[in-house]
Image (cartoon, rainbow, N blue to C red):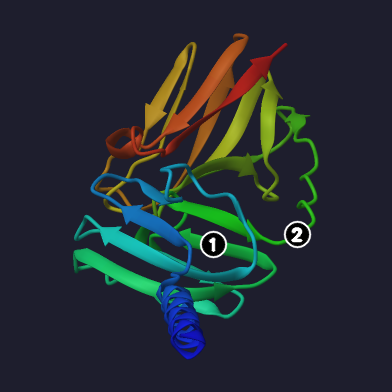
Amino acid sequence: MRRIVTLVVLLAGAALLGATEGAAVQIQEPKLFGTVGPGFSIMLKDAHGSRVTNLDPGTYEVRVEDLSEEHNFHLFGPGVDRLTSVAGMGTESWTVTLTDGTYRYHCDPHSTLMRGSVTVGAVPPPTPPPTPSTVTAKTKLALTSGPGFTITLKTAAGKTFKSLQRGVYTVVVRDRSRSHNAHLIARGFDRKTTVSFVGTQTWKVKLANVGVLKFLCDPHAAAGMRGSAKIVS
């Protein structure tokens, strides 16, 4: 009788051990979910549907849904460089190992507009850029539209600013795409290039009123090709 009991205990232990090992084999990596399209949107979320901004180092399964023939999903960083094709659509699953650092994702054709990033582990915060200054009419400005989905208004030296004083400005307008245009709007001023124009123009821009100076690409303003600066006294 004792031998029978001992045998039953041993078999039960073996079964429990086997079940434990089987369960260990079935444990999967934490899942992340990437989506791109169908509009100008790209996202990396966790299993709860929240945007991912920070992760612990480790191995992850990434399920990517590419919902557009105009975009792709490209994930890259230390030891990782995975992407879907631009022309293709569908779902892909990747297994990636993330280490301390910053990982970025974007759509390659529209990387300045469709992008995001995730920090992994302890990463020091980036150094904040210097506070933009107010420019005066003595400063020559440059308005650049394209060739990608970007439009900028900076000083001729390439510095950004958030405000400018009233006055008459010289603005060099660089329209670099037949898909975009460059448009400046303020109280008392409204001038733009045509969408088909590619080249450089120089405008005298008179800003006589306090308010807002807007710059935009008319066909793609809703997609993010726009900006503004305050006009101060």
Q: In the rendered image, is residue 60 in sight?
A: yes
Work out whether 14 lies above or below 231: below
Q: Is residue 73 left or right of residue 159?
A: left
* Kind of residue sitting beneath label 2: Val
Nearest to the observer: residue 99 or residue 23: 23
Residue 96: x and y, percent? 49, 75
Structural crowding at the residue carrying mark 1, measured as other residues with C-alpha within 10 Å and reported as few (<14), some (14–19) or many (≥20)? some
Q: Residue at x 52, y 77 (%)?
A: 80
Residue 185: x and y, percent? 45, 22
Q: Earlier in the sequence, mark 2 or mark 1?
A: 1
Decide: marks 2, 1 in contact (CB < 8 A)?
A: no
The quadrant holding residue 132 is top right
Q: Please tell me the numbered disc located at residue 104.
A: 1
Work out whether 94 lies above or below 165: below
Nearest to the observer: residue 193 or residue 76: 76
Residue 139: x and y, percent? 72, 36
Q: Residue at x 65, y 72 (%)?
A: 99
Residue where numbered disc 2 is placed: 123
